[in-house]
Image: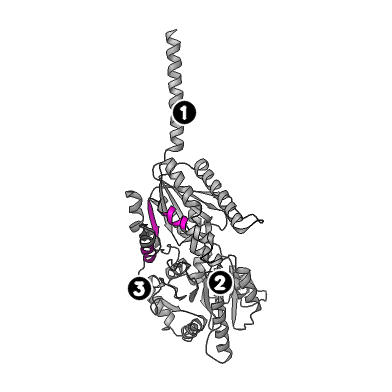
Amino acid sequence: MAVPSLVFILQALFLGSLLLLVCLARWWPRVRSVCVVVLGDVGRSPRMQYHALSLARRGFYVTLLGYRGSKPHDELLSNKAIRILYMPEVKQIPVGPQVFRYGIKVVIQAIHLLYVLLLKTSPVVYILLQNPPGLPSIAVCWVVCCLRGSKLVIDWHNYGYTIMGLTHGFSHPLVQLAKWYEKVCGRLSDLNLCVTNAMREDLAKNWNIRAVTVYDKPASFFTNTPLETQHQLFMKLGHTYSPFRASTEPMDPAFERSAFTEFNPRSKKVIQLDGRPALLVSSTSWTEDEDFSILLRALERYEQWIIDGANLPSLVCVITGKGPLKQHYSQIIRQMCLKHIQICTPWLEAEDYPLLLGSADLGVCLHKSSSGLDLPMKVVDMFGCCLPVCAVHFRCLHELVKHEENGMVFVGSEELAAQLKMLFSEFSSPDNRLNQFRKNLEESKQLRWEESWEQTVFPLFTQT
């Protein structure tokens, strides 16, 4: 009887040990693993995509969690160390008071996020969270970190309550509640990153949160676009957007001509056309922190100068992006009667956007930070392509745009129009102001994201 009993005991011990190992495997963080959380469209969150890629290059296993929408970068999709996990996006219910509708949405988001983090993802050493939006993601991620022994890292891009304040007003109870939540829950993190020195100082002074400044930097694929690649891009866009076509008449595809370049069948090379229009590029999320009426009024003033006989090139103005106010501004653009300026508002694939910036003559940025403490990443990308920028002024813009050095800063539409006139009046001259700005950007030898991340972020992940 003793032998069967001993066998039974050994079997029970084996099964119990196996069950314990299974539980530990489920709840014990995998070595060098990170979950990057974006409570938004993953494809429209470039900084968090860059974090994921940099972590993967350094040997971390990365789960990127967010909403399905725009296509992420191909490099991210092809990296075997990165797993993208999509959550269902929660919409507000259409009935009831606003506070009630918003509260229900937050509760459902919290339940979804908690469910996915606990039951759909493996344990990790770090959770790297984008803020905003931080409600309810900061609290949920903190709870998961407590349960699993992970460390919470918040990357502060802006303040969520200031973005809400643009819509509801800063005295609205929801905005005040969001501010209190962000301040209290933000202190629960183990490590904080932020995008400007001004934000770092503000976090320390007003919320007693210590953060490390990690400036946005362009990825390596933001660079000057070769003329042949420009031609291919314009032919591709020309199938959908008329400003990229010089003629609507059918022609042999081998000799297809865009508004900017032409294929020479004798030399088998693409050539730049004389008298070409200048290419003006802006990008936006079409939200309330960007007033595109400033640009549209400036373009109308520029058009009038051409009509009055000023020696200025015609313009093609491309405004990329999608968002809640796009339909509003698209309707205004359709009603404008411009003969020397063409405007189109495409949504570009992630791989085409850098090519467009690298082909442009001037960038325009209308981003006004809701907090005055973050910097527009679109300008960072433009500078990566050595593209000079005209940017609207706000509090900490000087940390990025140096007036009369790598671009120009303006306040309103009249000043922007005057800058466009001044910059493009010398357009045909090789020594024009735009080319000088380009030269300054090239000589600045600005760090790329990969180099900056290695210096500022990677040491933090190895010390905490």
Badge number at residue 443: 3
- At mark 3, the secondary structure is helix
Disc 2 on helix, strand or loop? strand
- Real-space CA distance between mark 1 and mark 2, rounded to the nearest whole angstrom: 57 Å
Q: Amino acid at mark 3?
A: Glu
Q: Residue 302 sits in which quadrant?
A: bottom right
x and y, in percent, of residue 299 in the image: 56, 81
Please name the amino acid that badge 2 sits on.
Answer: Ile
Q: Nearer the viewer, residue 313 or 12?
A: 12
Point 57% across, 56% down: residue: 69
Q: Is residue 396 visible?
A: yes
Quadrant of the image containing the N terminus: top left
Say which label, 1 or 2, has the lower sequence index.
Answer: 1
Residue 294: quadrant of the picture: bottom right
**Foreground disc of the pair 2, 3:** 2
The residue positioned farthest toward the bottom in the image shown: 309
Tag 3 or tag 2, which sits nearer the N-term? 2
Q: Nearer the viewer, residue 88 or 180?
A: 180
Considering only vertical position in the picture, is 114 above or below 456? above
On screen, residue 8 above or below 352? above
Residue neighbourhood size for the residue with mark 1, other residues' Cα within 10 Å, grouped as few (<14), some (14–19), many (≥20)? few
Residue at image point 58% right, 49% down: 108
Q: Secondary structure at mark 1?
A: helix
Q: Which mark is residue 97?
A: none
Residue 319: mark in rendering: 2
The mark that comes first in sequence, 1 or 3, is 1
Which stretch is magenta?
A: 180-202
Q: Which mark is residue 19?
A: 1
**Tag 1: residue type?**
Leu
Q: Is residue 264 in view?
A: no
Marks 1 and 2: CB-CB under 8 Å? no
